[in-house]
Amino acid sequence: MKTIALAFAVAFATPVIAQTANPLESETLMKKAINAVGTAYVLYGQGFTQKVMKDPGLPGERFVRVDVSSKATHPWDVGAQYAVDKPIKPGDVVFFAVYMRAPNVKDGETASVPGTGVGQAEAPYASIATLDAHVTNQWNVYYASTKTAAGWPRGQARASLQLGADKQVIDLGPLIVLDLGPDYDVATLPHN
């Protein structure tokens, strides 16, 4: 899994990786991951099916296809969650990235996945680092980052994706959440 995570990191975290001699052998980057990098999604809601599939062109080669059968009342009524296993300190830079695609949309169209990123795991469900993703039919990495104003103890934050915005098929590839500490320059991180 470490190699998968590092390969994923190479795809999007160039500023972090540029600081290491050989990113494919670096323990430094993986020590900053605050989730178990991969595709361990927990899906919730009604009116969807899920299937684990393979794509050899994707880091780790595995993804989860989620087929939402009809638009939900609220986008968050159907979703995917991902555990954040470590605490986040106030003032730390949090970086979220996920591979996604919407295989059934036509070229030039997008599917809506609002509320994508990291947020508080309980009410009031405050956003930590999120974006409203407009997902194309090709694999892309979607990013969110922030310098946190507050901290969250272990188990009080999680990554999530709201999938109920429409009747749609969304493929969820590897997901990573990094805590880059208080001294990282958010402006140097990739963004959509």
Image: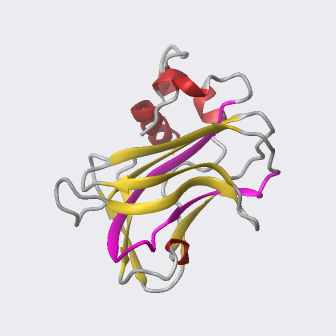
Q: Position of residue 121 (x, y in %)?
A: 72, 62
Q: Write the residue at 54% across / 45% down.
A: 176
Q: Position of residue 88 (x, y in %)?
A: 76, 43
Q: Residue at x 73, y 39 (%)?
A: 148
114 relative to 16, above or below: below
Q: Is residue 101 left or right of residue 160?
A: left
Q: Quadrant of residue 168?
A: bottom left
Magenta-colored span: 153-180
Predominant secondary structure, magenta span: strand
Single out the residue that lies furthest toward the bottom: 47
Residue occupying the far left of the picture? 107
**Is residue 72 toward the left or the right of residue 69 in the image?**
right
Colour setup of the view: secondary structure
The verdict on residue 145 being magenta is: no
Q: Nearer the viewer, residue 43 or 182?
A: 182
Residue visible at 37% across and 55% down? 134
Name the spot of residue 129 as percent of width and height, x first.
Answer: 61, 46
Q: Looking at the figure, which quarter contains the C terminus?
A: top left
Number of residue marks: 0
Q: Position of residue 87 (x, y in %)?
A: 78, 46
Residue 159 lies in the magenta-colored region: yes
Quadrant location of residue 47? bottom left
Relative placement, left or right, of 95 versus 70 is: right
Identify the residue shown where x is 81% and y is 38%.
Answer: 90
